[in-house]
Image (tube, rainbow, N blue to C red):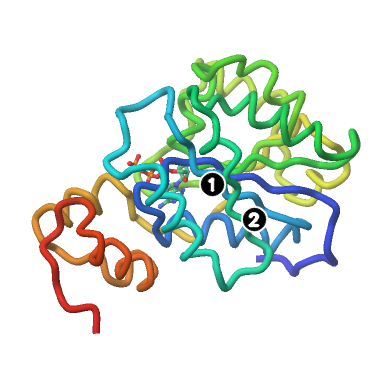
Amino acid sequence: MTSAINQSNAIGIMGGTFDPIHLGHLRLAWEAQSLLNFSCLEIMPCHLPPHRDTPASHADHRFEMAKLACADTPAFHVNDWEMKKPSASYTVETLEHLRSEHAADTPIVFIMGMDAFHNFCQWHRWQDILSLCHLWVAHRPGCALPNSDSKESGILRNAQTTDARALLSDSNGKVHIHNTTALDISATQLRHDMKLGIEPRFLIPDIVWKHINYHQLYQCQQTSTD
Ligand code: ATP
């Protein structure tokens, strides 16, 4: 990995269901933070995800777990804006809100995994998203680049930069694909395991596991947290 730069004025944002937050999310966010040194990286748990099933855990728990996971990382701010919305959490609306809070020339970088990018052109008003932010797309184990005839591949042909720091020289419109440390962790698999009583230790922060265990989320069997 190349060396870090002095603090930039850029803002990072990573949306997700975080059901629960795990080390794959945190490492993805941290590698973007390390390279671009955002003045703030907004971790934005969604309230009602528009493109998937209702989350297994209540939004309050998902928010609390994200707060616990990020408590020791001052650059990460867990943002409750989407949580407070009674309607579906559309990324474009969140970005419009974030953009309204910052100067027009502030780079805003939306961070996502490759699996999410595969469906990007099905997102609500996806064409507007690149006029509001850059995309930081992390490789994810088991997930290849989009097919060359897909709309997402077309976006890469027009907007991709291999230089992560080029995102700092404009406010929006570029896409960087990053070779994030491969961590084959998914919230779906964790939920499945916990239901069977298999502990997610060393895949999620201990403090998040304690929260899950204490509140008996994901119908896990209670075990000692000592
Ligand atoms: P699920 O398995 O339920 O789909 P998830 O683990 O993908 O959950 P999300 O909250 O949906 O978690 O993910 C938020 C963002 O983090 C998405 O952009 C997703 O692509 C990315 N992400 C999640 N896990 C990883 C991982 N292990 N490596 C890279 N990116 C990841």
Task: Tell me if 48 is positioned left or right of 10 in this view.
Answer: left
Mark whose residue sits in front, 1 or 2: 2
Q: Are marks 1 and 2 in contact (CB under 8 Å)?
A: yes
Q: Quadrant of ligand 1?
A: top left
Observer-nearest residue: 219 or 149?
A: 219
Does label 1 or label 2 sit earlier along the sequence? Answer: 2
Question: Dot 2 corresponds to which residue?
Answer: 32
Q: Which residue lies at the image location 66% right of the left edge and 16% below the top edge?
A: 127
x, y percent for residue 206: 35, 73
Q: Which label is found at residue 166?
A: none
Q: Which label is found at residue 138?
A: 1
Q: Which residue lies at the image location 14% right of the left edge and 73% below the top edge?
A: 223
Q: Looking at the picture, does residue 178 appear above or below residue 223? A: above
The image quadrant where one finds the C terminus is bottom left
Q: Is mark 2 within 8 Å of ligand 1?
A: no
x, y percent for residue 148: 51, 21
x, y percent for residue 147: 46, 23
Residue furthest toward the bottom? 226
Observer-nearest residue: 128 or 93?
A: 93
- Badge 1 amino acid: Ala
- Badge 2 amino acid: Ala
- Crowd around label 1: few <14 · some 14–19 · many ≥20 (10 Å): many
Q: Which residue lies at the image location 35% right of the left edge and 27% below the top edge?
A: 52
Task: Tell me if 4 is positioned left or right of 50 in this view.
Answer: right
- Crowd around label 2: few <14 · some 14–19 · many ≥20 (10 Å): many
Q: Is mark 1 within 8 Å of ligand 1?
A: yes
Q: Looking at the picture, does residue 39 appear above or below residue 93? A: below
Task: Tell me if 52 is positioned left or right of 44 in this view.
Answer: left
Q: Which residue lies at the image location 15% right of the left edge and 58% below the top edge?
A: 220
